[in-house]
Image: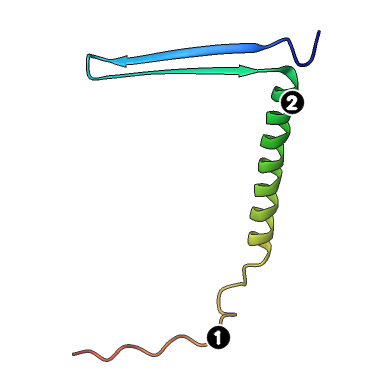
């Protein structure tokens, strides 16, 4: 298997009546597929860390200080 010459190719076509049609084509090498996999893994791990940190930094109810005074009614 040649990492840069063997390609994975796919295509799709959509048509909705006579008004709309679209075509798409993707062409990847094995090295490109590994790069996309590494990028997706990094994104998912990064978002998991962000969620964990945001959940850990929330304070319990009542630790935010006294409630705001009521607004005057007109």
Image disc number at residue 65: 1
Vertical relation: 51 (above or below) 18: below
Kind of element beneath mark 1 = loop
Above or below, 48 against 20 in this view is below
Q: Which residue is mark 2?
A: 34
CB of mark 2 within 8 Å of CB of mark 1?
no
Q: Is 47 on the left-hand or right-hand side of 4?
A: left
Q: Pointer 2: residues within 10 angstroms few (<14), some, or many (20+)?
A: few
* Placement of 43 over or under 72, stated as above or below: above
The residue carrying pointer 1 sits among few (fewer than 14), some (14 to 19) or many (20 or more) residues within 10 Å by Cα, namely few
SS type, badge 2 = helix
Q: Position of residue 51 (x, y in %)?
A: 64, 54
Q: Nearer the viewer, residue 37 or 60?
A: 37
Q: Is residue 16 left or right of residue 45?
A: left
Residue shown at 56%/74% (left/top)? Answer: 61
Q: Earlier in the sequence, mark 2 or mark 1?
A: 2
Left or right: 66 as drawn, with respect to 58: left
Q: Is residue 22 above or below residue 64?
A: above
Position in image of residue 27 (x %, y %): 60, 17
Residue located farthest toward the front when viewing the structure as drawn? 5
Residue 12, given in percent of the width and then of the height, sits at: 46, 13
């Amino acid at each position: 298997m040649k990492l840069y010459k063997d390609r994975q190719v796919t295509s799709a076509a959509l048509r909705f009546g006579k008004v709309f049609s679209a075509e798409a084509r993707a062409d990847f090498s094995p090295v490109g597929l590994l790069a996309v996999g590494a990028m997706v893994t990094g994104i998912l791990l990064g978002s998991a860390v962000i969620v964990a940190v945001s959940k850990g930094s929330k304070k319990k109810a009542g630790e935010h200080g006294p409630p705001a005074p009521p607004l005057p009614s007109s």
